[in-house]
Structures are given as C-alpha cells and as structure tokens.
C-alpha cells in the first residue's frame, strides 16, 4: 500500500495498514503531520493556551491571589513555543513510522499513464508500484473572488500562526472555528479585532443559542462582530488591508493592518496526475463511496480532499475504516451524523448531532434541557461561570438527537454526550447515570434532568 500525504488521515492510515501486515509506504512532500500538526490544530492550541492565561490574569489575577491583574504578553515567545510543540510531534510521527515499519518517502507523488505512480525528489523521479493507493493530500485555505491574498497584509492561517509582529488592527473574514480562534488569540495579545461573517450568526454550523453566548462574550471582550455581511473584496491598499462588504443593501468598508481570510478550505487535487486516472473530481473534491473507493480500481481517497467535514479526527477515522475495509475486516462505516465539532476560543464550543433548528425544520418532536455554568461549584472554583450545556431529546423515544456545550472545557465535555449518542443511550439512562462531584460534567446531568423539568440546582 502507498499513502500519498502524511496528515492526520494519511499517517494514521499508513500506520494501521502496517499493523495489519501490509507493506506500506507514505509519501509526503513537506512535513509529517500535515497542516493540522504543523500549521493548524496543534500550534493554534498552544497559542490559545497563552491567550487563556493572559485573560485569566488580566481579569482575575488579584481575585485569585496572584497580586496583580497586570500581564505583558510576549507574542514572539508564544509563537516560538507553538512551533517547538509542532516540531516535537512531527518527529514523533517519524518515530511511529519506524516503530510500525512504514517506509517514509520524501517527495511529490503523482499518477502517470498506465497505472503508474511517480515520485519526484528534486531532479530525480522514481516509480513506485502498489496494489492499493490512498490519496490523502489534504486541503489549503480557500479564498473567494475579490480576496487578494498576498501573505503579507491579506493573509491566511499560516501567516497568522507565525506573525512577524502584532497587528494593531486585525480584520478577520469568517467566523468558523479558524476565524474565532484567531480572533480570541489576537484580541488577548492586544490587537483590535473585527470579525466579519456572511451568515446571520457567528459559528454558522453551531446551534443558534450557543452561538449567541459566544457573540455576547466576544463583544464583552472587546471584539467587534459584524454578521450578515457579504465580503466583496479584500486587498492591500497603501500598506493596509481594506475590506469592502455589503450589509443590508449598503456597501461598507473597514480597514486594518492585516486581513485574515478564514472562509474554509479547498482540496488539494492539482498536480497529482488525476487526469491519468478514472477518479471523479468535482469542485476540488474527489468522489468516493462509503469505503473511500474512487472510480479507479485500487485508488482510494480520505480526509479533506473528499470534502466536508474537514476535520483532523474525521480524516483519521476515515483512514482507519478505509484500510480495514481493504484488509477485509468489515469495519463500521463512519457516522457523519455524530461527528464532534470543537472550537477552542474562550468560551469553548463543543457539539454533536442536530441543532434545535434542524430538529424543528425536520418536524421532529423534541424536549430541550439546559443548564448554566453559573451555579456549578467546579465552574465557580475555576472562575469560569460563563456558558451552558444544552441537550436535545426526541420527545417520544428519548433518543439523544443533539448536544451543545459552550463554556470552559466544552471541547472535552462534549465527548461524553457524543459517546452517549454512539451507544444509543436514552434520556432515561442518562438520568440514572451517576456523575462525580464536584465536576463540570455534573452540568450534563442537570441539563438532561432539565429536559424533564427535574433539574436540581436551577
């Protein structure tokens, strides 16, 4: 087996293939770990930890007994730490390849006529043969017409992760996870941040009630939020980033030292020789079946290159299912209706399943339970009383249809409710489950109880 790409989908697929006894090679043209480990998920979490501590001291330092609310964030030091963590994990994947017997090939892979696979390594090209080839080439930042990215003033996540300095004013286009996380980080570091979103709510994929909590919090933190605004252009003008957008029928303009374009990603399907295969590609997305087989026998595709949801954990899961299916293990198909979504700004957001509006649109009878962070003892001790847990059950069957959390550690807490959905746990079973005290997880129990009007502490 050959895997093209060593991101979260590719490297996991390669390791699992080797574990199952397949002679496996993984071809990567840049860094092991892909965008997630090197320029995405991992380094942003390191930066967000700095932002979180800055805000804790700034707003609670004296109250916590630390003597002062004064803090001087060091952007360069924070970035250096984040790059160090990425480098360490990058080496870790190399170690895992050696441990599991995966051959790591550095170079650019592309298909050639006659079912051949070529690897370009500098001035040399070598040919590799394999019974199975998995395409896991990932994605890159998307830009819509009129967005003139120059990597200096109009930038993407990559430049935002390794800034040359702190912009005094930063305009962010897009309020998905990437946009919101950078908004939180740069605001904490001292920049004046404005977020522009085309939809009528920030975090458009999240439950509207949850998104409202985040919007209120961001405004309280000093972040300007503009929704219902369709960006017409984003470009550099006299060294400044200028954004023109239409809102309520009027064209408005906003400027900043930099403009961060965070409007999603687009699959890397160019320069892989796809034209020499039978693969179907639409809008930079490779079409696959439930087992990630393309229309070309022996070629598979996983991860961001097959479309949304473009998440690292989805790619990894797809990689395992794909390889196990090839090996004849008959794995379960990926349940795309129960993918956990996580946004790591503060307050954090964790979600799975349907939103309340989706249930209403589908005519599903529901019972909704809610519980605030405010009365929770552990939340009080942490100084994190902003947020809520929301559970959505089928009114007749007790099925957990969706779960949404906003607040401290929401991205960790959501796993409990996502697992409950995987195991088809009912409302009654969750009610009878014992949660430890004092923990944030008690709020899950209270939200479930609230769906029956039985919450104890509200």
Image (cartoon, helix red, strand yellow):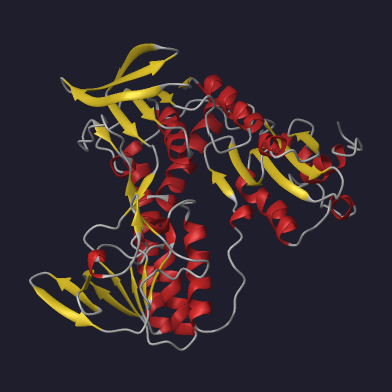
- Please determine whether, in this image, residue 22 is positioned above or below residue 152: below
Q: Quadrant of the C terminus?
A: top right
So how many labels did they put on this image?
A: 0
Q: Nearer the viewer, residue 224 or 368?
A: 368
Asked where in the image residue 252 lies, by quadrant, the reply is top left
- Please determine whether, in this image, residue 312 is positioned above or below residue 368: below
List x then y, in percent, for residue 396: 87, 46
The residue most toward the left is 123
Q: Residue at x 87, y 42 (%)?
A: 449
Q: Residue at x 16, y 80 (%)?
A: 126
List x then y, in percent, for residue 366: 80, 39
Q: Residue at x 23, y 35 (%)?
A: 149
- Please determine whether, in this image, residue 16 is positioned above or below residue 70: below
Q: Left of 412 or right of it: where is 377?
A: right
The residue most toward the top is 250
Q: Left of 354 or right of it: where is 241?
A: left
């Amino acid at each position: 087996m050959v895997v093209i790409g060593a991101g979260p989908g590719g490297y996991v697929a390669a390791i699992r293939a080797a574990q199952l006894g397949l002679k496996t090679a993984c071809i990567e043209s840049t860094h092991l770990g892909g965008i997630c480990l090197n320029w995405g998920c991992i380094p942003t979490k390191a930066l967000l930890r700095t932002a979180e501590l800055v805000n804790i001291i700034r707003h609670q330092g004296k109250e916590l007994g630390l003597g002062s609310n004064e803090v001087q964030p060091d952007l360069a030091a924070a970035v250096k730490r984040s790059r160090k963590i990425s480098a360490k994990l990058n080496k870790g994947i190399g170690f895992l390849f050696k441990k599991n017997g995966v051959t790591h090939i550095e170079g650019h892979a592309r298909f050639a006529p006659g079912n051949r696979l070529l690897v370009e390594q500098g001035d040399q090209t070598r040919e590799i043969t394999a019974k199975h080839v998995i395409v896991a080439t990932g994605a890159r930042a998307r830009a819509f017409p009129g967005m003139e990215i120059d990597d200096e003033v109009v930038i993407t996540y990559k430049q935002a992760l390794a800034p040359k300095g702190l912009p005094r004013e930063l305009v962010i286009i897009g309020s998905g996870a990437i946009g919101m996380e950078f908004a939180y980080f740069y605001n904490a570091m001292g920049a004046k941040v404005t977020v522009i979103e085309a939809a009528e709510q920030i975090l458009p994929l999240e439950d509207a009630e949850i998104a409202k909590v985040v919007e209120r919090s961001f405004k309280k933190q000093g972040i300007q939020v503009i929704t219902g605004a369709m960006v017409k252009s984003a470009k550099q003008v006299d060294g400044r980033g200028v954004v023109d957008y239409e809102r309520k029928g009027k064209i408005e303009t906003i400027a900043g030292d930099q403009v961060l374009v965070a409007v999603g990603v687009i699959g890397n399907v160019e320069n892989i020789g796809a034209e020499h295969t039978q693969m179907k590609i639409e809008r930079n997305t490779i079409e696959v079946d439930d087992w990630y087989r393309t229309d070309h026998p022996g070629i598979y595709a996983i991860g961001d290159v097959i479309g949304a949801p473009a998440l690292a954990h989805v790619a990894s899961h797809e990689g395992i299912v794909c390889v196990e299916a090839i090996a004849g293990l008959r794995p379960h198909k990926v349940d795309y209706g129960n993918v956990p979504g996580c946004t790591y700004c503060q307050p954090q957001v964790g979600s799975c399943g349907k939103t309340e509006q989706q249930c209403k649109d589908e005519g599903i009878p529901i019972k909704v339970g809610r519980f605030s962070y405010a009365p929770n003892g552990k939340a009080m001790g942490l100084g994190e009383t902003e947020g809520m847990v929301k559970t959505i059950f089928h009114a007749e069957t007790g099925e957990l249809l969706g779960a949404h959390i906003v607040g401290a550690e929401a991205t960790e807490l959501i796993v409990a409710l996502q697992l409950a959905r995987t195991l088809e746990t009912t409302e009654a079973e969750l009610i009878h489950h014992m949660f430890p005290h004092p923990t944030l997880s008690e709020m899950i129990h209270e939200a479930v109880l609230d769906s029956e009007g039985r919450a104890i502490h509200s």
